Structures are given as structure tokens and as C-alpha cells.
């Protein structure tokens, strides 16, 4: 299974990745924990550029998808091929949310890049941690210095949140929405309960949504 965690910065999603990994390991499954942008040495270097260097939205999008291609080839696809559960902190939904929604970049271009880079590969399940931008902003301010995304205003994050909802509406069967305004233990219970509900029926449905993800005409592997 390929499972992703999504939500605006400050939604608290990263806190629950380790608990879900333990849930799967208790069921004798190999688990790969990873993140985007990142997951490989090259992709991590691209991440630092995206998070800290000023650039236009197209450059930003190209770097994110370049990191994703590397991540898919080196980490995600090999792990899935050997039967592991891959838990990833962000994936392509974040690109549509941040570059498409937050930056206002062309969704049609992002959709083309999505096809070129990942073919039919989509997560089997995406946890969307939903929280109002003002709540997320207060949480971010309490724990860390912001990067250039986290430093954006509430209007930016409102657009990001709306873009996530648009992605959810376009692919509703893939998403499980988590009320991230609750206390961490309550959110954790939500995540594990949703996972238990999905785990029993995911297999055939998830396999049907996956195709040959990286054999994309015109894109060298």
C-alpha cells in the first residue's frame, strides 16, 4: 500500500506517521517512512532549494516534480514492488495545493507534469488533515521558525486548503478526511480507525487504480 499524509502546514499530520507505521509493523508488514520533497539525497537537496530559495511558481513546480521522479524511482516503486507499506509525508496533492492553489499556478500544466513524472501512480489512500488556516498558523508560530512556505499569510493557506478540497472532490474514494482541530490523541484515534476501516477492502480497489506507473512515453527512466 502507498499511503500519503496531506494538509496545510500546522495541521499536525507528521505527528501521526510514526503511530501508523507502528500499526502496520504490528501486523508484520515492512514499512517505509518517507517525505516529499525529499526521500533521496538528490531529492533532499532539491527540497532545501524549494523551501529556502526564492523562485517563480514554474521553477518551483519543476523542482518539486524532479524530486518526485527521483523519489519514485529510488524509493517508492522498489518498496511497493517488494510488498512494503509506504507512508509518505506529502505527495502530488501538495503540489496542486501549494503551487496550484497557494501560488495560483496553472493546474493544467501541473496535471501534465503529474502524468509525465508518475504515469498512473497515485496513493492507495490519502489522509487529509483538515484544519482552519488560523489554527494552523498559531500552531506553527509556537514550535518553529517558518520556511518560505510557512511564512505565507492566512489567505495563502486558505487557497491551499481549498485546493486540497478540490483534489478530494475529484478523487473522493482515495481520501480519508481527518478533523485535525481535535487533541492529538483524538486525531490519532481517528487515523487508526480510518486505517482499520480501509485496510480490509483496499487491496483489490487499490490494485485497480495502479497501472504501470513509470513506463511513460517520452520520459526516460
Image (tube, rainbow, N blue to C red):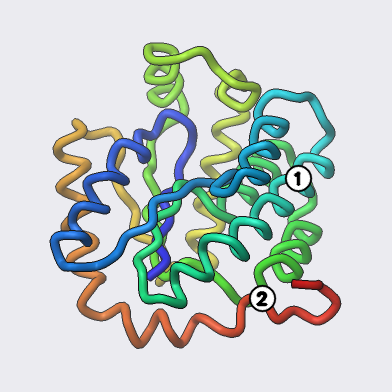
User: In the visual, does 16 lie left or right of 50?
Assistant: left
Q: How many marks?
A: 2
Residue drawn at (79%, 49%), measured in percent from left and top? 62
* Element under disc 1: helix
Residue 175 rendering spot, x and y as whole percentages: 40, 62
Up/down of 59 relative to 154, above or below: below
Up/down of 69 relative to 10, above or below: below
As drawn, the label of residue 161 is none
Up/down of 34 relative to 116, above or below: above
Residue 72 rendering spot, x and y as whole percentages: 59, 63
* Element under disc 2: loop
As drawn, the label of residue 63 is 1
**Residue sitting nearer the eye, 157 or 215:** 215
Up/down of 215 relative to 133, above or below: below
Quadrant of the image for the N terminus?
A: bottom left
Decide if residue 194 is in sight here.
Answer: yes
Residue that badge 2 annotates: 214
User: In the visual, does 152 lie left or right of 221?
Assistant: left
Residue drawn at (28%, 42%), measured in percent from left and top? 16
Quadrant of the image for the C terminus?
A: bottom right
Residue drawn at (76%, 62%), measured in percent from left and top? 113
Label 1 and label 2: CA atoms lie apart by 18 Å
**Residue sitting nearer the eye, 24 or 139:** 24
Residue 47 rendering spot, x and y as whole percentages: 64, 37
Classed neighbour count for the residue bearing mark 1: other residues with Cα under 10 Å, few (<14), some (14–19), many (≥20): some
Amino acid at each position: 500500500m502507498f499511503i500519503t499524509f496531506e494538509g496545510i502546514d500546522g495541521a499536525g499530520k507528521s505527528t501521526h506517521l510514526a503511530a501508523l507505521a507502528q500499526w502496520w509493523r504490528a501486523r508484520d508488514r515492512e514499512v517505509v517512512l518517507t517525505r516529499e520533497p525529499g526521500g533521496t539525497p538528490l531529492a533532499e537537496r532539491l527540497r532545501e532549494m524549494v523551501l529556502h530559495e526564492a523562485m517563480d511558481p514554474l521553477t518551483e513546480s519543476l523542482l518539486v516534480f524532479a524530486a518526485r521522479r527521483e523519489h519514485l524511482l529510488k524509493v517508492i516503486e522498489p518498496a511497493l514492488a517488494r510488498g512494503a507499506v509506504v507512508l509518505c509525508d506529502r505527495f502530488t496533492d501538495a503540489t496542486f495545493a501549494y503551487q496550484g492553489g497557494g501560488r495560483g499556478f496553472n493546474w493544467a500544466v501541473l496535471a501534465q507534469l503529474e502524468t509525465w513524472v508518475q504515469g498512473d501512480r497515485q496513493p492507495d489512500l490519502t489522509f487529509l488533515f483538515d484544519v482552519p488556516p488560523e489554527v494552523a498558523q498559531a500552531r506553527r508560530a509556537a514550535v518553529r521558525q517558518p520556511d518560505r512556505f510557512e511564512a505565507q499569510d492566512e489567505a495563502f493557506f486558505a487557497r491551499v486548503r481549498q485546493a486540497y478540497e478540490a483534489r478530494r472532490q475529484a478523487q473522493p474514494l482515495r481520501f480519508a478526511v481527518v478533523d485535525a482541530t481535535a487533541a492529538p490523541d483524538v486525531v490519532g484515534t481517528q487515523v487508526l480507525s480510518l486505517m482499520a476501516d480501509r485496510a480490509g477492502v483496499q487491496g483489490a480497489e487499490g490494485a485497480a487504480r495502479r497501472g504501470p506507473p513509470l513506463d511513460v512515453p517520452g520520459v526516460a527512466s
